Image (cartoon, rainbow, N blue to C red):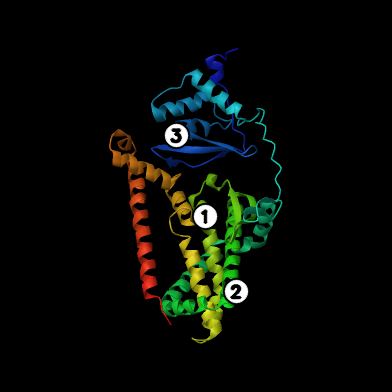
Amino acid sequence: MTTPPGELLSHRPALRPDILLSPALLHGAATVHLIKEPAAGASFEVGEKEYFLISRLDGARSLAEIGEEYARTYGRRLAAPHWQRLLHLLGARGLLAGGPPRPAPEPAARAPFEGTLLRGTLRLVADAHATTTRLHRLLRPALRIPVLLPLAAVTVAMEVLLAAHLPELARDTWWLVRQPVALVAVFTLLWLSTALHELAHGVAARHHGGTVGEIGVRWRLPMAVMYCTVDNYRYLRRRRHQLAVAGAGAFANLLFLLPFLAWWAALAPGDPTRRVLSGLLLLGSVQALVNFLPLPPLDGYTMLGHALRVSGLAPESGRYLRLRLRGGPAAAAYPRRARTLYLGYAVGSVLLVALILAALTTGLVLLPVH
């Protein structure tokens, strides 16, 4: 039975309160929003006009009132069939309050260990979100702005000091490379720093409203790294919260070095322990600062995407560049902001990689031989 248009427009439907809506994201030539149903884990993209309607389904405004807002904004009135299609779609996905939720898929039984001895993963905790919640509760007093800002200033001062001693650090690191026992100790500490890096992402996500899906170890011998899967922080409304989650790992790497900096500064140049610490400080700083580079899959790339509100910046930049090189109307159809961002990132990333390669080449040439 078809609902009469007048009766339909008087309805005041509402989204379920747990439905997640992302900020506007540039994706290719379009501006999209992500919508996620957390229980089933399903997410999908909608355009600006669809988001305009869906985000206003709050149970207070009628469809007629939302339709008036839509007409004032876009200069077009929506007919009853359009509303019926939209509500049918939302209802079928279990997104409307009062309707039956979409059944969540049965979780596949997963063993803690997956893969082989040469390549695989090992989950370290049964409930990663509960684990990071406990860590967050412990660390919450230190996650306030009056604490974090001075710590950030201290890490900047540390990097300035280390840059001033770069020749000494380079010489000592070259010496360290030829000391197997000390080198193993340094790399063990750096591995611990990577573990703290991953946990910092999880704690920051928990602090700002995200969730953590899994904590474990992933290996492809001879390399093994810890990982922490962060969910839902793409839906955080504040850009600075997304940036904080993405940048928390590298910041934790820098904080990890501070006690070793104090130890290093207390020793005389040439002291064997100071030389080992020099290698740790240089390699640890490189480990942290490289993560801020805006290249995939580094944290800096994720931060740039959040800062610009762009989804898939690298692949979309490559796609736009290919269209532009071919010529034709496809590239011209991109809005001005998309053309500027994609072309700027494509050119900038090539220049950045070239600069890094030049710096590495220069460093190898100038590497001390004694």
Instruction: Please give left or right for residue 101 compared with residue 36 in the image.
Output: right
Mark identifier at residue 185: 2
Mark identifier at residue 201: none
Q: Can residue 260 be seen by looking at this rendering? A: yes
Relative to 40, residue 231 above or below: below
The answer to which of 306 and 42 lies nearer the viewer is: 42
Relative to 286, residue 242 above or below: above
Task: Check contact, mark 3 vs mark 2: CB within 8 A.
Answer: no
Q: Quadrant of the N terminus?
A: top right
Residue 226: image location, x then y, percent: 61, 58
**First reached walking from the N terminus: tag 3 or tag 2:** 3
Residue at (57, 30) in percent of width and height: 60
Rounded to the nearest whole Å, what is the CA distance between mark 2 and mark 1? 28 Å
Residue 192: image location, x then y, percent: 61, 66
Q: In the picture, residue 326 is in which quadrant?
A: top left
User: What amino acid type should be assigned to the residue bearing mark 2?
Assistant: Ala
**First reached walking from the N terminus: tag 1 or tag 3:** 3
Residue 366: image location, x then y, percent: 37, 75
Rounded to the nearest whole Å, what is the CA distance between mark 3 and mark 2? 53 Å
Residue at (45, 31) in percent of width and height: 49
Task: Check contact, mark 2 vs mark 1: CB within 8 A.
Answer: no
Q: Quadrant of the C terminus?
A: bottom left
User: What amino acid type should be assigned to the residue bearing mark 3?
Assistant: Glu
Q: Can residue 146 be seen by looking at this rendering? A: no
Relative to 140, residue 48 above or below: above
User: Label 3 belongs to which residue?
Assistant: 48
